[in-house]
Image (spheres, rainbow, N blue to C red):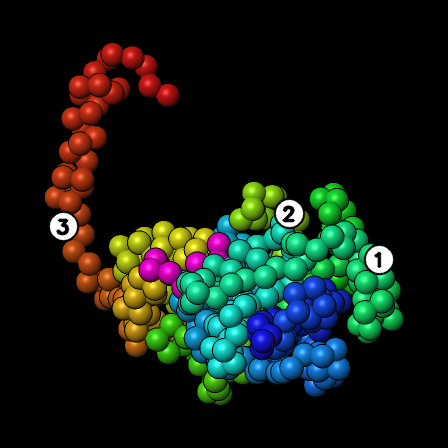
Amino acid sequence: MAKEKVVLAYSGGLDTSVIVKWLQVERGMDVIAICGNVGQDERDLGPIKQKALDMGAIVSEAVDMREEYAEKILSKAIWANGKYEGIYPLLSALSRPLISKHLVDIAHEYGATYVAHGCTGKGNDQVRFETSIQALDPSLKIIAPVREWDLKTRDEEMVWAEAHGVPVPTTHKKPYSIDDNLWGRAIECGVLEDTWNTPPADIWTMTNNPEDCPNDPETVIIGFKGGVPCSVNGVEMPLLDVILKANEIAGRNGYGRIDMIEDRVVGIKSRECYECPGALLLITAHQALEMLCLDAEALKQKAKLDVEWASLVYRGMWFSQSRLAIDAYNAYTQQFVTGEVRIKLCKGGIFVDGLRSTYSLYDYNLATYDEGDQFDHSASRGFIELHSLPSRIWSRVQGPGSGLQPIN
Ligand code: ARG
């Protein structure tokens, strides 16, 4: 009988390397190892791909997903000013649905009935992979070996690996758990688990230490078309390149570090350090431009929808009715978010320095306090008469004007 096939989300790290072997030994399956390039620091995926083949995978592929990640996913994150709990730009949450989509496509291509991932049982990423995969193809079965096996510690895993011919890392245990891609880096575990510990200087690799940055600010102009960044300092480029540039510029000015307590889907609070220089620069610029181009009501609705969007994506619901519906609201509003934003970066700080747009709703002649003022001041009198009507009635019947009780 032909063996069952399983498509594995494979990174080349210890866990997913052990899984390549474990699925063969413990489950008797044929393994298809898929390593997604989403812009992580690990640039050369060739040896990682080869390692899976050496361990017996029947197929091993490194798939460059960067352009698709930028164009299809990060553009929507910028539209939604996507930040979970108002702070975290969702870098891990955004990459998982994209990787899931590729896993499902590859499962179909090879006739695999299983998909596997290397997430632990207490994180968010298991929720995102499995929710995305099931939304795309509910008939696929999922295996999460790290949740199932009884290799409790890294040492036990190393022993199992050595016994089964899985190459083990020669370097010492990494002191942190890292996940990174185009949208930034997440750093967890180790000394960071004590919330009073200062994050050690060596956790940061995308951003300079703000104290050591140049004293003079650096100015950068980000151009937007339809809510999506399309140029840096007047030079047009694809979103992928804008993001790479933004990471570089903000990073060298020490901007983009986050140290927060975050509420995971599974109910745990965790201490998370992130560096997202490009993501935060682009979202800051985008949000500033929206304030120029969208009216007060649209902004008010959008602020609520932005919160929902981030929460949905954080909880693994990229492929869902609600996320698609919010993106439909954004597709309408964002067609007017076109223009330029001038930003200054200095020693870890960011300052919006100027804005312009052909769709600007800012009207100089209405706003000015100088000559040329076209605002009808006399119209305000009648407006306030009606605006204050409920206040006057309330005062007379129940409030300070009623003499019923003193008011604070
Ligand atoms: N807490 C972040 C999130 O849930 C980062 C997760 C990082 N993932 C990892 N495997 N280290 O989105």
Q: Which mark is residue 379?
A: 3
Q: Amino acid at mark 2?
A: Ser
Q: Name the residue carrying label 2.
A: 270
The reply to whether residue 16 is in sight is no
Q: Is mark 2 within 8 Å of ligand 1?
A: yes
Residue at image point 87% right, 71% down: 170
Local packing at callout 1 (Cα closer than 10 Å; few below 14, some 14-19, many 20+) is few
Secondary structure under tag 1 reads: helix
User: Of discs 2 and 1, which sits in the foreground?
Assistant: 1
Q: Name the residue carrying label 1.
A: 155
Residue 369 versus residue 12 in the image, above or below: above
- Measured as percent of width and height from the top left, residue 188 is found at 69, 55
Sequence-earlier tag: 1 or 3: 1
The reply to whether residue 271 is in sight is yes
Q: Which residues are magenta?
A: 314-322
Quarter of the image for the N terminus: give it: bottom right
Secondary structure under tag 2 reads: strand
